[in-house]
Each structure stands twice: as C-alpha cells, then as structure tokens.
Image (cartoon, rainbow, N blue to C red):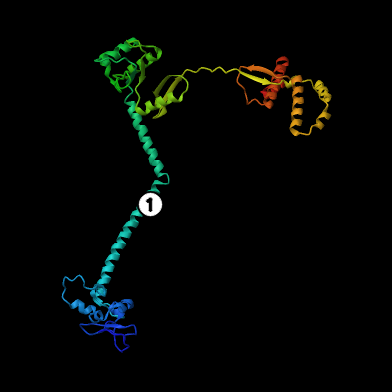
Amino acid sequence: MSTLKNESKSCGGCLQAIDHSGHLTCSLCGQNYDLHCAGVTAQCFGALTGDRRAAWSCAACKSRQPKTDNTETPARAGEGGVTMRRGASRPPAMDMELDEEAGGNNAAVGARIDAVEARMEAAERRRAEAGPDGAEGLRRTVEELKLELNERDQEALLADLEIGQLPEQKGENPVHAVIVLATRLGVPLEERDVVFAERVGAPPAEAGGRARRVVVRLARRHLRDELLRAARVRRAVTAEGGGRVFINERLTRPNRQLFHRVREECHIRVLRVAVEHKPDLSRHCMLLAEFKLKKEKPIPRWVIYRPLKNILLEQLNLDLNAIKWENYKCIQSVNQLVGALTASVRGLMDLHAPLKRQKFKHPPHPWLTDTIRAMMRTRDIYHKKYKVDNTIALQDSYSTGK
C-alpha cells in the first residue's frame, strides 16, 4: 500500500526519514522506500494507479523470487541487482578485488606506453643518424646504382654491333649476311669470328615493311672497332638490294634513348652519334655527335629612312622663317592645328631629307649603340695614324681604343 501522508516513517533502503515527496510500500516485505531508493521519479509516481502502487515490490524481494521466463519483469533498480544504501560503503573484499584489477590494468597500460616510447625513440634515433637529407641520400644512391648497372650492361656489349636497313629475306642466314657486308667494307670475317647474329625487333608485317635490325656479337673487340672504322670511311655502303646500310655499336636501352634524344633535340642534320668509353672519365662515357653545320644566309631586308645628315641647316632655317606662323593662330580646333603643323613639318622634311629605301644584306647589330660606334671610329683614327707615324704613343692609344 502506498500513501502520500506525512507520517514519521523511515526508508528501508537509506534508513533516513521520508520527506514530503511520497513513498512506496513493498507488497511483500511491507517496508517503506522513498522515491529515490525505489528508483521511481516523481512524474512516474504521479502516473501510477492505486492498484499498481499496491502491487509494487522492492528490488530485494524481486531478487529472491524464482526466475521465470517472464519478459515483462521490470528492470532491477540497482546495478547488478544490488541496492546500495546512501552513505554506506562497499564491502572490503569488493574494494580489494577492484584495486587488484585496476592495478593489473594500470601495469599493462604502463607496459604498452613504455613500448611505444621505446619505438618512438628508436625511430628518432634512426632519423637523426640519417640526417635531414636522408631521403635525398637514398634517392641519390638509387640513381648511382642504376647508372652502375647501365655501365656494366654497356661494358658487356663492347663487342656487339647493330646493323640497320639490312634487307630481310625469308629463311636467310644472318651470319652469312654479316660476313658479306664486312667483306664489302674491306674487313675479312670468318664464321668463327661471329659469336651470334640475329634479328631483333618487330616483324616487318607489324613495322610497316621495315626490316628488323641485326644484332651481331664478334669474338674480339678489335674486329668491331675495325668494322666501325670502315663504316665511317665508307658511309655509302649498300647491301645486295641497293639500299644504304647503317652500322653502329650496340647500346643499352638508356643509352639508346639518350642517342635518340640527341638527334631529336638537334634541329640540324646529325651525321653520326657514337658512344666512347674512356677509362680517364671514371665510370662515365662520352657521347660524340657529328653535325653538318651550314651557315644560314641572312634574308635581305628593305629599310625606309630619312638621311638627316644631309640636311643643310642654313636652308632649313630660311624655309622655317618663310612659313607664316601667324596663320595658325586663327585655327580654333586643336585637331586642325595639329594637322596643319604636322603637314608643314612633313613638307619641310620631304624637301630637305626625302625618304629613301635601302636594301641591307647583313643582319642588324642592335648591340652597337651610338657610344660604341663613336669609340670604334676613334679606334680607327688612331689605327690610321699609327700606320703612318708608327710611334709608341699612337700604338698605346690604338691599343686602349681597341
């Protein structure tokens, strides 16, 4: 039975006096509980009907009831089914168990933090040893290793040749074709001098009918050098079909790309590009390109100018004084005044320095300013005087001007 009367009753949970907010009475044990210990808010307490208040039971009585498969059983008031009294402390055994568990957790967390700190210190130590340029140093090391591999690959090809534009026939013997070509160049070869000779590249059907290049490895390096030397002397050597044949040393893929890059960057005709391995250049090789330089003829240009040096100042002053400048005062419009003055000045210039059209075959020299031209004239004057008198003073003046 529940009531809101202000009677002197004590709470069965906290053992304190029940205030004016109301209380509930357990239907099983008959003890009174204030709303806080009962786990009921004032709003819910006001919504409870008389039958539900009369049937209410405390958490302790509910915990002693046998468990049944009743899904409508209300939730327990306390955590873990235990209602703690206000102001009461936990049992010592529970505190000891909680302390031991917390101590174990703290030790595990501390060990993990120490491990993380150790890893961070090791990473910082490695970074300090590598220095600020660690990544750049690794990048340079990788580039050096790539260069070294390329140099070793090129050294393995020192006895190889590449023959381009050699006509390809079905069922041919590349070794025989190389021996015939070497004989035309004046370098006798035998079959024992050729380690192997084979075609490389895309088939002619896929390359637009272009013959694949022939890769040749000779038994001795001096034979390769003789063939290259003879090919440079006889550049117009042809195959059996009549087409020109190109003989070059075999290059690695990076060197071949550099070879083609040189030919693409040069806008002039490249006769030959060769790679020479010099022991004096450490692990580097020299790329030699032979060009055919042809001096371009400058395009003639026509220049229209006024020869101001030929103006006679006295006659020009007379013509200027002959102009009736008083007539310009009557002109009110600024545009008309400017037009009239421009026509008068242009007429004078056409009379004393008419326009001339001259053809120049040499390119202009914009770096030759008036000051430089005056110094050149002074130099020429001293040079002429030095040729006539041949004195030390004139020689010094000519040298200074030069």
Q: Nearer the viewer, residue 188 or 314?
A: 314
Q: Nearer the viewer, residue 19 or 380?
A: 19
Provide residue 238's location: percent of width, then percent of height: 36, 11
Q: Quadrant of residue 277?
A: top left
For the point 18% across and 78% down, the residue is 64
Provide residue 194's location: percent of width, then percent of height: 27, 17
Q: Residues within 10 Å of mark 1 (few under 14, many from 20)?
A: few
For the point 84% across and 29% down, the residue is 326
Q: How many marks?
A: 1
> In the rendered image of this protein, does residue 148 appear above or below residue 378?
below
Q: Is residue 168 left or right of residue 356?
A: left
Please name the residue that numbered disc 1 is placed on: 124
> In the rendered image of this protein, does residue 239 appear above or below residue 37?
above
Element under label 1? helix
Provide residue 364's location: percent of width, then percent of height: 62, 22
Q: Nearer the viewer, residue 243 or 19?
A: 19
Provide residue 215's location: percent of width, then percent of height: 30, 20
| Quadrant in the picture for the C terminus | top right
